[in-house]
Structure formats: C-alpha cells, structure tokens
Image (cartoon, rainbow, N blue to C red):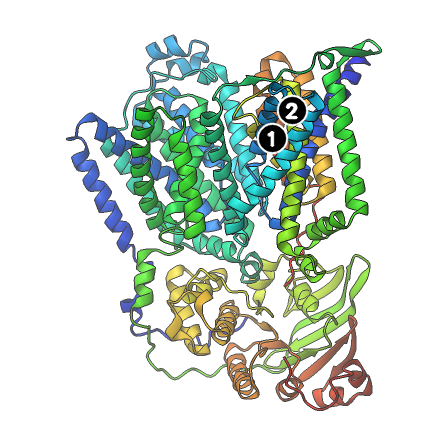
C-alpha cells in the first residue's frame, strides 16, 4: 500500500513535468511543424534566472515568477532569431535548426556561466516532508504535483475558453484554417512560442527545485523524454502530450522501483524500448489523428 | 489482361550518348582521390596521418547517413548508435586474451578466449550493426513524421545498453586496448567501398523508390512504390555502412567510451551531411572535407584561448548558416553527373512506325460498386458506383464537394473507404494497399499535380516503370519512349519541379502510363487549359488509350470537354450518383441541371 502511494506520487510528479514539457513541444509543433530540441535549453535558462533571482535576494516566489516569465520571453526571441528564417522549410530542416540552436546554447551556458553545476538555494521550508499514512512525501514533491496539476487545469480552461486557446487548437487540427479565420500567422506563432516558453519555465522550475542544482546540459535529457512523450501521445495532439507524459513516467518509475538490481543499469534502454514498441503499434501516436492529407 | 506493351517498343537512338545521369563519373573521381590519399598516407608524419584516417572514417559514417537520410529525407539521430555497436563488437572480438584479462575480467569465458584477426572482427562489427539495424528498422519503417524522434529513442536505447552492459563494455568507463589497426590505407579502402555502395544505392531500384517517397509519399505509393519496405531496406543498408565506420573507428581510437557515440558525434556527422547537401554522394564527400577543415582550425583556436566546446559551437553555426543561406547544401539534391546530363544534349528517338494498339471488344475493366465513405459523420460518398470499359472514356462530373476526388482516392486506396467492392479486370483489389492497386494496373494523376520535384523528369517515370517490374536499365528506355509519347522528351534530364504547369501534367500522365495501366484515372487533367489546349489534350488521350489498350476515368468541370470526350458519364451530387449513362442524355436530365444550378446548360469553360 505504502509502496503504491509512493509510486503514484512519484509518477504524478514526474509525469506532470513531462506533460508540461510535451505540451510546450506540442503547441509549437501545431503551428510550425517544428519539434524543438532547444526546448530543454529554455528550461536550463529558467534555472539560471531563478538562481540569479534568489542570489540577488528576491523572495522565492518572486524569483520563480521572474524566471518563468523570462523563459516565455526567451522562447519568443528564439523564434524571432532562429526559426523565422526557416519558417516554411521542411520538418527535417526545422528539426536540424533547433538541434543546432540547442547545441549552441549549451556551449554559451558552458562558457558564459560555468560548465559545472550550480546549487540552487531552495528555501528551508521546502526541504521538509509530510507524511501520508506511513509514507513520507517531500514538500518539493507536493509543490511539484500541485503546480503541475494547477498548470494543466489552467491550460485546459485556456484551451477550452479563450480565443487564443481556441486558435491554437484549431491550428493543431489544421493550420491553414487559422489563416482563413483571419488570424495573422506571425502573431499566432509568436504566441505559441510564448506559451511554450512559459510551460518550459514552469517545468524548469519544478525540475531545478527537485534536483537542487542547475547545469548547462540539464535540459537536454528531460526534453529527449518529452520528445518521446509527444510522439507516443501523437505529435501535435494536446491531450496526447499529457497522456504520454504520464505513460512515460509510469513506465520509468515502475522500472526504477521494481527492476532487479542486476538489470538496473539497463533502465533507460528498457524504458525507451517499451516506448519504441508502443510507437510501432501506434505509428501516429496513441491520440494522433490518422494522416488525412488532402489529395 | 494487363495493358499490352504497344507503344513502348521504341529504343532511343542517342540513348547511350546522353545517358549521363547514371554514370559514376564523380564517384570514380572521388574513389581515385581517396585511393591516392591511401597510398601516400603512410609516408606522412603522425598528425596528418591521424587527421586523414579520422576524416576518412567519418566519411564512411556520413555516407551511411546519406544512404538513409539523404535519400529518404528523414533525419536520423540513431546511426551513431550503430557506429558504437560495431566499434565495441570489433574491439571485443579482436583483443588478445591477455588484454581482456586486464581490462574486461568479467567477460564470459567463451568471449575471453576469442581473438579474431582485426579484419574479421571488423566484418563481425558490421554484421552486429546490421542486426541492430534490422531490429530497429522494423519500427522505423512504420513511421514517417515521427521517425526522426524514434531514431533519437534508438540512440538512447543503444547508449543505455552500452552503459549498462558493464561486463562487455566497462560501462561508462573507458574501454581500452584495441589494436590501432586503422591506418590511412585501411580507412581509405573501407571509405571507397562505402562510396561505391552509396552511389550504387542512389540509382538502384530501391534507391529511386526511396527518393520518390522523400518527395511525395502519396504519389509514390500511387506509382506502385512500397514506401515502408523501401525505407526499411535503406535503413538496414545504412546501418551496415555505419557499422563499417564503427569498425574503423575502434581501430582508430584504440580506447573509447559510450559518450563518444552520442550527440556530439551525431552533431558532427549531421553537419557534414547537411553542409555538402544530403541528396548526393558528392555532397557527403564535400561536406566531410569542408567541415573537417573548419573543426581542425577551431580546435586549435579553442585550445589556445581556452574556450570550452568551440568546435560544437562552430558546427552549430555552420548548420544554421547552411540552413538559412543554402538549405539544400552545396550540392543540392544532385550528383555532378546529373547536372552535366541536364546541360547536355536532349535525347532523341529514332522514328519508327508505332504498332497499332489492339483494342479489344468493349470489356469492363474497372467496376466500383457500393462505395460509401463517411468523414466523422459527414457522408462523403453514399453507395456510389462507377464503371470503366477498355478503350472507352468514362466521365465523372459533379459540383464542388460532391465527392469526386474522394471517389478517386477511395478507388486508389489513398483514402480508406468504409465499404466498397472494386474489380480491376479479373482482380478484386479493394483490400489491397495503394501500391498494390497501382501495380495491378491502376494509374492516376492528381488534381494538384504531385510530381517528385527533386527527381529528373526521366526518373519520375522510371520510378513507376520499376514498380511495373522493369530493371533500371530497361526502365530508362521505356521512360524515354513514354516521355516522347506525351511530348516532353526534350525535358528528360531537367528536374521535374522546374517544368511549366502543362509539361508537369504531361509528365504525370507519362508516369501513370509507365505502370502499364489497364485503367487511367485522370483528376481534372485539363484544369487551367484553354479550349484549344484541352481539345489537343483530348486527342492525345484517345491516342494514348488506343496504344495502351486501357480504359479511362476522366474527372473534369469542363462540360464541353466531357461532352465531346466521354463514352459514358456519371454525375455525382452530395456523394450520390444521380445519373449515369450516355453523356448527351445524362446532360439533358433536369436533375443534372438542378445540381449544376449556376452552371446553366450553356457549355462553360471555367477554372
């Protein structure tokens, strides 16, 4: 029972982060057909801004807010500087562009800040834990679950109720329709990057606070996971991104908890093998729409 | 009966003289250059020797990427994984038992005692990479949009396995003690093999099919291309060649760890591929040479000023500049010999009397019945039917949105019908895939022309000839004859995307004819043409049909054209067949007029 509770808590907290990252990827993919490798570097940037905020004596929540907003802004700038010149290019070109941007940012962080990890001074009240039944749950995890769930609910309302949310859902369905509805493509793309950046920012804060440090290559690995999440959910599918996040997290944590010690080193390999096998049964992702190209 | 070969007997006179595009001129040139490097390499001092051996080893890997990514258009991040698998396999199998005792003490006894000669171990490395390629290819072949991301997954799986298999690889620690076997001549020999394999593949049957699907998946499968299978074959072949790089890399480095086969090497190799132009073997060679030169200089500068990761930053900047300024890379999609052939003389054909086509008695060659298709509740086609007879033109008209194109797509299998029975001659084809229907004799054109834009006009047609079972050599001849028949022979070596609208349509018709179809489905072939042009086109259709002994399903808006062309006519409205039969009678029916309200009964030439 306790094992199950702690399993679920872990799945929800990691899955929530993956879901936020994958949603950020899905939003941009919907409007641009771009799978953004550099999404992870936005997370890393958030970590550094958060660190700077705390070090300059801001209150924790103020620093968090600034970091998330900075990340949103950085995403908009990234689109402007790096992706605008290749906007109408093929998916492969866009993917390669983002891969190069990601590599470039990593080198910039390494040289501009430090190649080594920097500890994030998390407020003391966050480092204690609370107990549910016999199991201990750290407050960081409680925070991560709460923020993750609140963000997902807020997004759900945003996509269902607001004009821009509707526009992005329409774009995810068929980008050309949006043009017909009189929405300027540039503006929608900028907006999608802003949203995607904010999501990366929230995920970045959760990630950094859980690890307690930030380093230049930090964002790369979770974003690789989020890629896979977005793909098993169905590229460009918003529901799929969330579902995929929890599926991957469930597999990952299950292996981490119950895999025999002897095979533990193969954990990543096994996780991704499972995922790739899922993908081979659902080539368009579990929630992906079947290809309906107009002929 | 399939269409006869009538009309395909022409053998072009100047064929041999102008068949430049399939010559290996530039490849032979590169191979001789590499062979020379291999010969003089051993005389150089150590530093340039290492640089040359390293460049040649990377060239092998970039050629592997070219084989898959260049031809299919799907970026692969997974190939470095194959390089790793092969490097470790080569290392483990070639080491002496004494060294293994020291570095890999927990290796299973059977492997402890094995010590193969290095070249044999290299072959085993290639085999291992190929096997992993087959396994991963089973997944990759099923994907298109998400294939690149799945290849990232494959890289992570291989990396994780190399790190996890500590008994075999020492985990993330350095694996050492591999014989430094890869001298310049060794790397040069393997590179030459890779070069020839890559160039051969590009113009092979599978290679042409993969390139066709890179440009347009839907029209590729409508031209009989088995997209998934071709993609699988390309993936496995390129995994094997990547294995060649791994085998050389093991003998070059002597000591390595799993992180040497991860994203940094991936970035390096992809940069080389993209700078040179992924679509050609020449591009791979040029890309490796250029990028190596830049990396070497950056490394020196970085070391002297103590900047971290300057080479990675340099590679990233090179990629961005290439994609911004010249997205297709230096060589674009073309080999130098293709560009030369393009500038060369147009092929001509000796005039021969065309054998008359044998038109058999009015035999029903295509029958489609009970065709129903719903799109999320909306009924696009409701129990529709249509028939085509050999040697006759069957017309299909209907207002916009009445389901004409959906009908063609359901017949060809591009869209899956909810229910339908399709007989093509004696064959029942409604359960078959698009490519199978195409090979069974269903040729089509598209409303919004879908050629393989980056292939030559000749290759566009050759792709379909190959589907019909021809070898590349005989396909070249048949394709030239077909291009002559539709009147675009002089454009044979141009790239399809460069042609005028009208000529592109002609190429599309030639491509459809190359399947030796028993039925041609033409979706608004006269769109954008004036009455004189469409009349000429019509005469051409009659001639083509006679020669190919095929039936034709013609969709058009142009009532004049339909009236004069068709032997029978079907009218669709809201997914239902509202009239079928003799064109004159059908066109005078009041319900047909009602459906065309706004068109009136005056013949119009709109669009």
Residue A284 seen in this snapshot: no
Q: Quadrant of residue B156?
A: top right
Residue B489: x, y in percent? 39, 74
Nearer the observer, B373 or B54: B54
Return the residue at label 1.
Answer: A43
Residue B232: x, y in percent? 51, 45
* Position above or below: A118 against B485: above
Q: Chain of mark 2?
A: A
View extreme (right): residue? A133
Residue A67: x, y in percent? 64, 29
Could you confirm whether marks 1 and 2 are on the same chain?
yes
Q: Residues within 10 Å of mark 1 (few under 14, many from 20)?
A: many
Nearer the observer, B432 or A214: A214
Nearer the observer, B183 or B340: B340
Does the residue at mark 1 contact the one at mark 2 (Cβ under 8 Å)? Answer: yes
Q: Residues within 10 Å of mark 2 (few under 14, many from 20)?
A: many
Residue B473 seen in this snapshot: yes
Q: Which residue is pictured at 55% across the width and 46% down the height?
A: A80
Q: CA distance from mark 1 to mark 2?
A: 8 Å
Regarding mark 2 in the picture, which secondary structure is present there? helix
Return the residue at label 2.
Answer: A207
Q: Which residue is pictured at 48% across the width and 53% down the height?
A: B210
View extreme (front): residue? A57
Q: In the drawing, does residue B152 fall left or right of residue B584?
A: left
Regarding mark 1 in the picture, which secondary structure is present there? helix
Q: Earlier in the sequence, mark 1 or mark 2?
A: 1
* Position above or below: B42 against B603: above
């Amino acid at each position: 029972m306790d094992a199950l509770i702690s399993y679920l808590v872990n799945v929800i907290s990691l899955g929530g982060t993956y879901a936020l990252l994958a949603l950020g990827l899905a939003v941009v993919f919907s409007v641009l057909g771009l799978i953004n490798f550099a999404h992870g570097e936005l997370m890393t940037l958030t970590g550094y801004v958060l660190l700077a905020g705390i070090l300059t004596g801001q209150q924790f929540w103020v620093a968090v807010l600034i970091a998330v907003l900075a990340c949103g802004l950085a995403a908009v700038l990234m689109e402007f500087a790096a992706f605008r010149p290749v906007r109408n290019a093929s998916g492969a070109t866009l993917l390669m562009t983002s891969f190069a941007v990601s590599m470039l940012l990593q080198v910039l962080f390494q040289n501009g800040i430090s190649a080594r990890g920097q500890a994030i001074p998390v407020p003391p009240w966050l480092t204690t834990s609370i107990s549910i039944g016999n199991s201990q749950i750290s407050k960081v995890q409680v925070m991560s679950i709460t923020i993750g769930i609140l963000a997902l609910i807020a997004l759900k309302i945003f996509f269902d109720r607001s004009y821009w949310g509707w526009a992005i859902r329409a774009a995810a369905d068929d980008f050309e329709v949006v043009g017909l509805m009189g929405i300027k493509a540039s503006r929608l793309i900028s907006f999608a990057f802003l949203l995607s950046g904010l999501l990366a920012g929230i995920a970045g804060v959760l990630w950094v606070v859980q690890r307690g440090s930030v380093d230049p290559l930090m964002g790369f690995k979770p974003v690789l996971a989020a890629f896979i999440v977005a793909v098993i959910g169905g590229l460009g599918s918003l529901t799929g991104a969330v579902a995929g996040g929890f599926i991957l997290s469930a597999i990952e944590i299950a292996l981490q908890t119950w895999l025999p010690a002897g095979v533990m080193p193969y954990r990543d390999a096994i996780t991704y093998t499972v995922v790739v096998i899922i993908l081979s049964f659902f080539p368009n992702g579990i929630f992906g729409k079947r290809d309906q190209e107009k002929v | 009966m399939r269409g006869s070969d009538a009309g395909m007997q022409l053998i072009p006179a100047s064929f041999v003289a102008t068949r430049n595009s399939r010559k290996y001129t530039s490849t032979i040139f590169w191979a001789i250059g590499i062979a020379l490097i291999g010969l003089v390499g051993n005389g150089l001092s150590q530093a340039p020797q290492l640089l040359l051996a390293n460049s040649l080893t990377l060239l092998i890997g970039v050629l592997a990427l070219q084989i898959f990514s260049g031809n299919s258009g799907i970026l692969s991040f997974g190939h470095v994984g194959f390089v790793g698998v092969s490097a470790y396999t080569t290392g483990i199998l070639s080491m002496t038992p004494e060294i293994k005792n020291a570095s890999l003490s927990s290796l299973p006894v059977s492997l402890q005692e094995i010590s193969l000669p290095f070249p044999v171990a290299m072959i085993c490395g290639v085999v291992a990479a190929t096997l992993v390629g087959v396994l991963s290819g089973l997944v990759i072949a099923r994907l298109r949009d998400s294939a690149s991301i799945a290849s990232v997954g494959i890289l992570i799986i291989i990396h994780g396995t190399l790190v996890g298999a500590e008994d075999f690889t020492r985990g993330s620690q350095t694996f050492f003690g591999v014989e430094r076997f890869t001298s310049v001549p060794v790397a040069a020999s393997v590179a030459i093999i890779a070069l020839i394999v890559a160039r051969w593949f590009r113009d092979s049957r599978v290679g042409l099919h993969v390139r066709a699907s890179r440009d347009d998946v839907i029209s590729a499968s409508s031209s009989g291309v088995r997209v998934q299978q071709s993609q699988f074959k390309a993936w496995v072949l390129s995994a094997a060649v990547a294995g060649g790089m791994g085998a050389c890399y093991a003998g070059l480095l002597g000591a390595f760890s799993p992180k040497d086969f991860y994203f940094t090497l991936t970035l390096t190799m992809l940069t080389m591929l993209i700078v040179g132009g992924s679509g050609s073997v020449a591009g791979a060679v040029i890309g490796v040479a250029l990028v190596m030169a830049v990396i070497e200089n950056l490394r020196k500068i970085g070391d002297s000023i103590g900047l971290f990761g300057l080479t990675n930053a340099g590679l990233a900047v090179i990629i961005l500049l290439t994609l911004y300024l010249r997205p297709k890379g230096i060589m674009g999609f073309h080999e130098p010999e293709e560009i030369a052939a393009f500038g060369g003389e147009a092929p001509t054909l000796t005039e021969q009397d065309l054998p008359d086509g044998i038109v058999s008695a009015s035999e029903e060659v295509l029958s489609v019945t009970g065709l129903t298709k719903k799109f999320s509740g909306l009924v696009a086609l409701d129990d529709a039917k249509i028939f085509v007879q050999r040697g006759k033109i069957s017309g299909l008209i209907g207002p916009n949105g009445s389901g004409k194109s959906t009908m063609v797509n359901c017949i060809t299998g591009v869209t899956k019908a909810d229910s339908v029975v399709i007989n093509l001659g004696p064959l029942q084809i409604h359960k078959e895939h698009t490519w199978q229907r195409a090979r069974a004799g269903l040729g089509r054109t598209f409303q919004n022309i879908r050629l393989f834009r980056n292939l030559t006009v000749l290759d566009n047609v050759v792709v379909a000839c190959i589907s019909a079972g021809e070898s590349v050599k005989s396909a070249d001849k048949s394709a030239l004859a077909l291009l002559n028949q539709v009147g675009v022979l002089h454009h044979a070596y141009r790239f399809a995307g460069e042609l005028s609208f009208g000529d592109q349509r002609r190429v599309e018709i030639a491509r459809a004819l190359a399947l030796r179809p028993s039925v041609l489905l033409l979706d608004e072939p006269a769109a954008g043409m004036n009455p004189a042009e469409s009349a000429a086109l019509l005469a051409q259709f009659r001639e083509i049909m006679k020669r190919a002994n095929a039936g034709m399903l013609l969709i058009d808006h142009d009532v004049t054209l339909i009236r004069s062309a068709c032997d029978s006519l079907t009218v669709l409205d809201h997914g239902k067949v509202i009239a079928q039969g003799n064109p004159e009678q059908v066109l005078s029916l009041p319900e047909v007029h009602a459906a065309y309200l706004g068109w009136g009964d005056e013949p119009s030439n709109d669009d």
